Amino acid sequence: MDEASPAEPGVEEDTVFAGANPQGGAGLSLELLIPYLGIVPEEDRLLREEGARLVPRHRDAFVERFYEQLDRYESLRAVLTTDRRERLRRSMATYTEDLLTAPLDDEYLRNRLRIGRAHLAVRLTPSWYLGAYSVFLDWWPPLLAATPQGTAKVRALHKRLL
């Protein structure tokens, strides 16, 4: 292994770069990600329970705000045709619900990998989709923080967004 590779000794390179593998992410597992991201199961459970209460009341307004942010940038507006926009709004609503309510299981991980591959396929650069997370970080933490054990729920959300 050359000096430029960030893989640790004894760790297969495809494990480190699994998310970049457009064929499926072999080596990327929940058993690796949960401790790596510092996900605390009790905090995650609290997030999912609160998410089940918050998402039905706030999801549509959040999705609207999300696309208002994207519309501020000509390069994003140009690719968001009317047909594509409607489909992506539905996808964002599902993504938001899963982010806040779904258990961390193999299906959750597969969905995240599928979304990553879709971003890769349309050549959406990390700066655009990571920047869009600012909308998540502006919207959901104040709502979560205002609930009992809100700090734990906010921590769980941050870890899921990573």
Image: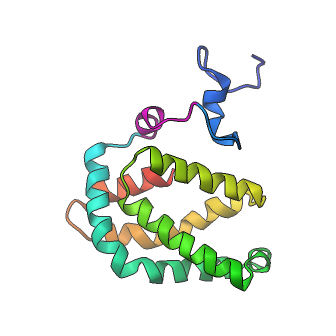
Q: Quadrant of residue 5?
A: top right
Quarter of the picture containing the N terminus is top right
State the extent of the magenta-drawn residues as a range: 27-37
Left or right of 39? Residue 127 is right
Left or right of 63? Residue 125 is right
Asked if residue 47 can be seen in this view, the reply is: yes
> In the figure, 115 relative to 144: above or below?
above
> In the figure, 122 relative to 37: above or below?
below
The spot of residue 91 in percent (x, y) is 56, 70
The colour scheme used to paint the residues is rainbow
The kind of secondary structure the magenta stretch mainly shows is: helix
Left or right of 1? Residue 133 is left
Q: Residue at x 46, y 67 (%)?
A: 96
Q: Residue at x 46, y 49 (%)?
A: 107
Asked if residue 145 can be seen in this view, the reply is: no
The spot of residue 88 in percent (x, y) is 62, 73
Q: Residue at x 47, y 37 (%)?
A: 33
103 or 11: nearer the viewer: 103
The spot of residue 21 in percent (x, y) is 69, 39
77 or 117: nearer the viewer: 117
Q: Residue at x 49, y 35 (%)?
A: 29
Q: How many marks?
A: 0
Q: Is residue 104 magenta?
A: no
The spot of residue 134 in percent (x, y) is 55, 66
